[in-house]
Image (tube, helix red, strand yellow):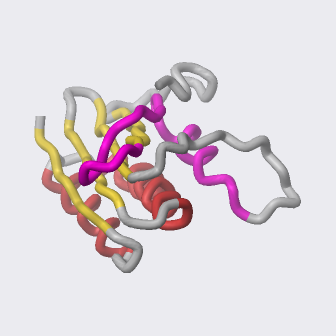
């Protein structure tokens, strides 16, 4: 397994995080999932920037059949899929993650010695993602 870690704070440009993601996927010869992975990474990092007082850490791991995206932060609040509401601005990030990932979830973890969580998503390296209802939101 290969892994790439990127620490970020609220001041980091999203372009830096996205470029690190693109570089890892290029190195792993995974061009077929670049766009989906960039959306997932962007949404998960944006959630940390919006809902926590400090930064976090992105970890991308190449596994035999998936890219595992993990974003750690210091908030114990696990993400929730909100019901669709065409009148609400925002709040669709986890819906995007759920739609693009084979599976996703969250688990308790610590970052820099503080209690928090890791939100993770698996993106299939091979064609044929699971159906939208299968394997979603497991912890």
| Front one among 20 and 78 | 78
Instruction: Name which residue lies at 82% across and 60% down.
Output: 88
Q: Does residue 53 lie above or below 109 as drawn?
A: below
Q: Does residue 78 lie above or below 21 as drawn?
A: above
Instruction: Name which residue lies at 42% across and 32% down.
Output: 107
Instruction: Name which residue lies at 45% across and 27% down.
Output: 128
Quick check: 76 left or right of 24? Answer: right
Quick check: 112 left or right of 72? Answer: left
Span colored in magenta: 90-116
Q: Position of residue 127 (x, y in %)?
A: 40, 31
| Front one among 121 and 27 | 121
Quadrant housing residue 58: bottom left
Q: Position of residue 109 (x, y in %)?
A: 34, 38
Q: Is residue 108 magenta?
A: yes
Quick check: 65 left or right of 120? Answer: left
Give the quadrant of the N terminus.
Answer: top left
Q: Is residue 2 magenta?
A: no
Outermost residue to the top? 134
Q: Position of residue 52 (x, y in %)?
A: 49, 61
Q: Position of residue 15 (x, y in %)?
A: 35, 75
Q: Does residue 16 lie above or below 58 as drawn?
A: below
């Amino acid at each position: 397994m290969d892994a790439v870690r990127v620490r970020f704070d609220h001041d980091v440009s999203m372009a830096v995080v996205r470029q690190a993601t693109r570089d890892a996927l290029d190195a792993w010869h995974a061009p077929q999932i670049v766009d989906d992975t960039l959306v997932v990474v962007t949404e998960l990092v944006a959630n940390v920037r919006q809902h926590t007082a400090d930064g976090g850490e992105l970890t991308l791991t190449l596994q035999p059949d998936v890219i595992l995206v993990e974003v750690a932060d210091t908030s114990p609040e696990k993400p929730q899929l909100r019901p669709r509401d065409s009148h609400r601005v925002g709040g669709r990030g986890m819906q995007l993650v759920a739609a693009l990932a084979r599976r996703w979830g969250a688990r308790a973890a610590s970052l820099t010695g503080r209690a928090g969580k890791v939100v993770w998503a698996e993106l299939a390296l091979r064609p044929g993602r699971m159906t939208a209802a299968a394997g979603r939101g497991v912890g």
